[in-house]
Image (cartoon, rainbow, N blue to C red):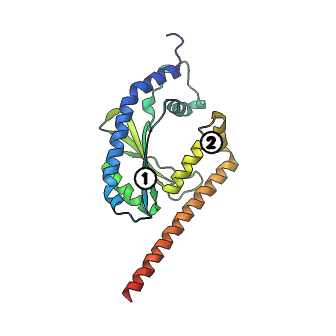
Amino acid sequence: MANRTIEDRLREEYFELLPDIRRVLEELEARARFKIMPISLGLDQYERIVIRSRVKECESALDSLRRRQEGATFDREHPDEYTLTNLRDLAGVRLLVFPRSHLEQIDLALRREFSHWEADHIRDSEASDAPLALKYHGYCGASDRIRGEYQIVPMLTGLFWEVEHAAIYKPAPQLRGVAREPAMQERTRAVLKALGAFEQEFEDLIRRSYAASNEGKSE
C-alpha cells in the first residue's frame, strides 16, 4: 500500500518475529535457571535470587528503535533501513540478587554458559566504579534472527528500577523527559547510592555476626 508507514511495517515485522522472540525467552530462562540452580539451592533463608522474564511489547520495541535514530525519528525517505532485529532486548531475563555478594558467582556461572555473548554493562554516567548491573546479549539456539539479553542486578536496585519505569515511562509519553531532568537524575543517583550502602552494611553485619558466632563456638 502506498500510504503504509514505517511504523506499520515494523508492527507487521514484530508479530512475524514474535514466535522466535518467545522461543528465545524460553531457552534463555531455562538455561539461566539450570546454571544457577546449585547457587539457589545453597542460599541462606534471608538470601534471594528472583528471575524475571519479559517479551518486549510491540510499541515499546518501536519506541526503542526510534530513539536510536538521529534526532529520535525515522527517515521517511529510507523505510527499508529499519528492522526490529537490530534490537538486543526483544527477549530479556533479569536476575535480581540479594545480597549483592552473589553477583560475581552468578555472573561467572552464566558467562560459562553464554561464553560468546557480548557485555554491555549498565553504569552510572558520573561514576567510574563497579557497574550498577551486569548485562549481556547474544544469539542462542532458538533463533538466528533474535538476540536475547540477560541482566544480573542487585535486588534493591532492580526493584527501584521497576518502580521508576512504571511511574515515569508507562503512564504517558510526555513524562519520559522527566527522567533526564538534572534534579531527577541527582535524586535517582542518591537513591541508588543509598540502596547500595544499605546492602553493603547488611552484608558487613552478617559477616560480623557469623564471625562472632564462630568465635563463641571455639571458646
Q: Earlier in the sequence, mark 2 or mark 1?
A: 1
Q: Where, by quadrant of the figure, is residue 89 drawn? A: top left
User: Label 1: which residue?
Assistant: 50
Pick whichever, 151 or 112, lies toward us. Answer: 151
Query: Between marks 2 and 1, how big is the CA–CA gap?
Result: 24 Å
What residue is at 40 percent from the left and 65 percent from the top?
Answer: 44
Provide residue 64's location: percent of width, then percent of height: 53, 34
Q: Where, by quadrant of the figure, is residue 144 drawn? A: top left
Q: Residues within 10 Å of mark 1 (few under 14, many from 20)?
A: few
Q: Residues within 10 Å of mark 2 (few under 14, many from 20)?
A: some
What residue is at 48 percent from the left and 56 percent from the top?
Answer: 154
Provide residue 204's location: percent of width, then percent of height: 50, 71
Provide residue 192's location: percent of width, then percent of height: 58, 56
**Disc nearest the viewer among 2 and 1:** 1
Count of picture labels: 2
Provide residue 170's location: percent of width, then percent of height: 59, 38
User: Label 2: which residue?
Assistant: 168
Q: Where, by quadrant of the figure, is residue 169 drawn? A: top right
What residue is at 45 percent from the left and 29 percent from the top?
Answer: 84
| Secondary structure under the numbered disc 2 in the rendered image | helix
State whether residue 177 is above or below residue 212: above
What residue is at 37 percent from the left and 41 percent from the top?
Answer: 138
Name the amino acid type tagged 1.
Val
Pick whichever, 75 or 10, lies toward us. Answer: 10
| Secondary structure under the numbered disc 1 in the rendered image | strand
